[in-house]
Image (spheres, rainbow, N blue to C red):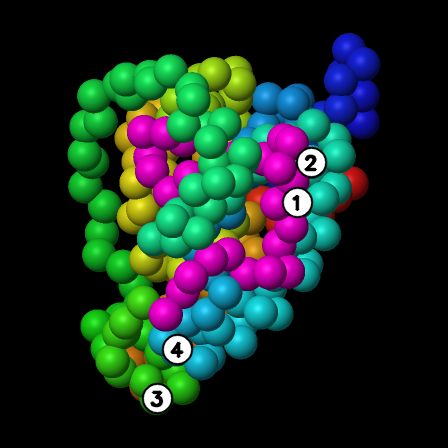
Amino acid sequence: GEMTGQAVFTLHERRWNLGQDDDGHVVWHEEIVAHTVQAGRTAIIVCDMWDRHWSRGAAERVDALAPRMNEVLTAARNKGALIIHAPSETLAFYEDFSARRRILDLPPLEPPEAAEFPVPPLPIDASDGGSDTGEVEIHSPWTCQNAAIEIDEERDLISDKGLEVYAALGHFYIGQVVIMGVHTNMCVLNRSFAIKHLVLWNVPVVLARDLTDAMYNPAKPPYVSHDEGTQIMIGYIERFWCPTISSVDLLS
């Protein structure tokens, strides 16, 4: 679509709201709101899409997600979106990249005071680390972002720090953030640049629900398949944190 000559995304934002049916029973209502945003005022944050992982299952799913994610990022970048690569704990690898230096050169910006607000505990149990392939010893084998995701040195940014990302959002007049990557119940919520911080800073954010994965072992509550565990986590975010979209919205 076109809006005053600018490329746009139409985001079909899905939320769930708690209410009552006509007979007074408590129910969740699905709500989908179409929201049009300028592509040039949209930033996409790629969370922790690493080259390897301590869990074989997690690594396999990231490897499967990465090519599709790259296709979406390429299309969105071509429309004018800002891509921020956030492969946490690997930034030493990127210290000479212009995409890294460019965000470091931006003036700092003080985010608003973030008031915590109460949310229920997570609906999936990852107390064992969440691997579905038997590993229990958590360590950090990642060294950089997954190679299937291209970094445009001229236009993209690289950071794993919330304050750097917040400064970039202000500098580039970003009015909408889309976050994608892993893992839905951990870093996608909790990293300094991720959903909780953005929501508490009043930054409009949506999760790309088809480009994420949870750390969840089906042997743990709620005793469902790995995919169902991820879907339950997505539903929790839609209920308590922010809406989600399908990445199709960034392609069309």
**Magenta residues (range):** 141-165
Position of residue 121 in the picture relative to residue 249 (left or right): left
Mark closest to the chain's N terminus, 4 or 1: 4
Tell me the distance, in whole angstroms, between the alpha carbons under discs 4 and 1: 25 Å
- Return the residue nearer the eye: 32 or 50: 50
Mark closest to the chain's N terminus, 2 or 3: 2
Q: Is residue 158 magenta?
A: yes
Could you say which quadrant of the image residue 236 lies in? bottom left
Position of residue 133 in the picture relative to residue 68 (left or right): left
Kind of residue at badge 1: Leu
Residue 154 at x, y percent in the picture: 65, 32
| Label annotation for residue 134 | 3
Residue 36 at x, y percent in the picture: 65, 26
Mark closest to the chain's N terminus, 3 or 1: 1
Kind of residue at badge 3: Gly
| Label annotation for residue 176 | none
Position of residue 140 in the picture relative to residue 232 (left or right): left
Pick the quarter of the image with the N terminus.
top right
Secondary structure at numbered mark 3: loop
Kind of residue at badge 2: Arg
Q: Find disc 4 in the rendering and name its residue.
A: 55
Q: What residue is rendered at 18% in x and 34% in y?
A: 116
Q: What residue is rendered at 47% in x and 36% in y?
A: 100
Pick the quarter of the image with the C terminus.
top right
Q: Estimate how packed mark 1 is, as few (under 14), some (14 to 19) or many (20 or more) residues with alpha carbons within 10 Å.
A: many
Q: Is residue 173 above or below residue 220?
A: above
| Labels in figure, total | 4
Tell me the distance, in whole angstroms, between the alpha carbons under discs 2 and 3: 38 Å
Q: What residue is rendered at 61% in x and 70% in y?
A: 64
Secondary structure at numbered mark 4: loop
Q: Find disc 1 in the rendering and name its residue.
A: 73
| Label annotation for residue 77 | 2
